[in-house]
Image (tube, grey):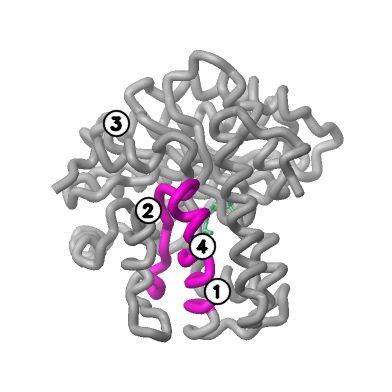
Amino acid sequence: MTNINDIAKQMVADGKGILAADESSGTIKKRFDNIKVESSETSRMNYRRVLFESKEAMENYISGVILFDETIRQCNKDGEKLVDIIKRSGSLPGIKVDMGAKMLSKMNNETVTEGLDGLRERLSEYSSLGAKFAKWRAVIAIGEYNPSPLCINVNSHALARYASLCQEAGIVPIVEPEILMDGSHDIQKCYDVTKETLLKVFDDLIAHKVDLKGICLKPNMVIDGTKASNKSSSKEIAEMTVKCFKESVPTEVPGIVFLSGGQSETDATENLNEINKIENTPWKLSFSYGRALQSSALGVWRGKSENEGQCSKAFTHRAKMNSLASKGHWSKDKEI
Ligand code: 5MM
């Protein structure tokens, strides 16, 4: 049996990143509403199958795929398990195990991610279904008085309990504390909140005896809020992001895979590329994008079987661009 340290290294293999295809039923419905496709078990399977069957992308650029509970159990119309399609390409199947962000009582519009009850049993089942890694997303919003220390503490504690249960089951935990881009805060505020959160998360991971060599961190980049008056350059974003991580992420962590968080496809690629141009970083720095890998692909698919080839091509293009960015080798002229 491969150990968690080897799996974690495989997740951040050179030039590869992770496809986040774990949209919960509500989120995938919103994505399908935008392209006027009804969200059903069959349409969700069909769309995701097209991504997973994109041989060039999956074999060369995608080290793992985060699945939703429904998807890890699904087969294509020929009866082949989607998990087996992923494995055949040399990529690893992973699973979202959190049960979503729920309102924190007595707090001002803050959430805590739930899902710890019964997690040990669910992990054991997911392992038998082929999952090699898992994901848990904590959500921290920036506001005039937020985040509160309580919000950071409870989310960080849950991430640590989740991570230690994953490792007990031989599954690599993706630890995802997402500081949302929503708001008018500047990049410095994002830097401060990201650093405070990461310091707390690593304190808790260590207290819960989590082996840091057997995790993947999935953070936000340090970036201005979507409504900020200033828009920092990619170079500034990269410098602030790497500085923040150097001050808060232990060097034993094998890899950091960024979420895209609502950035456009090309912004997410360009920012990752600038990050990887910085020398002497102790971790692999790659991607685990959802929207920034899928937006174009979804737009061309539109639920029609005759568009599957173009959908696959669009996904492959973004995967390739982000692979280049994960090595600092991307440039604008490589976009179509
Ligand atoms: C793919 O979306 C994931 C699931 O979201 P919901 O639980 O809201 O349905 C999400 O956790 C995703 O993995 C991360 O937010 C990263 O995706 P982006 O689009 O920010 O790169």
Distance (Cα) linking label 4 and label 1:
11 Å
Give the residue at the far right of this rendering: 229
Q: Dot 1 lies on which element?
A: helix
Residue 54 image position (x, y, % from top left):
51, 62
Any part of residue 97 in sight: no
According to the picture, the residue beneath numbered tag 4 turns out to be 54
| Residue kind at label 3, given as amino acid type | Leu
Q: Identify the residue at horizontal 49%, vertical 68% (top origin).
A: 24
Q: Upstream in the sequence, badge 3 or badge 4?
A: 4
Marks 4 and 1 close (CB-CB < 8 Å): no
Q: Quadrant of ligand 1?
A: bottom right
Dot placed on the residue nearer the N-terminal end, 3 or 1: 1
Q: Residue 91 has which mark?
A: 2
Residue at the location (80% across, 44% down)?
227
Q: Residues within 10 Å of mark 3 (few under 14, many from 20)?
A: many
Q: Main secondary structure of the magenta part?
A: helix
Nearer the camera: disc 2 or disc 4: 4
The local secondary structure at tag 2 comes to loop
Q: Position of residue 321 (x, y in %)?
A: 63, 43
State whether label 3 is within 8 Å of ligand 1: no
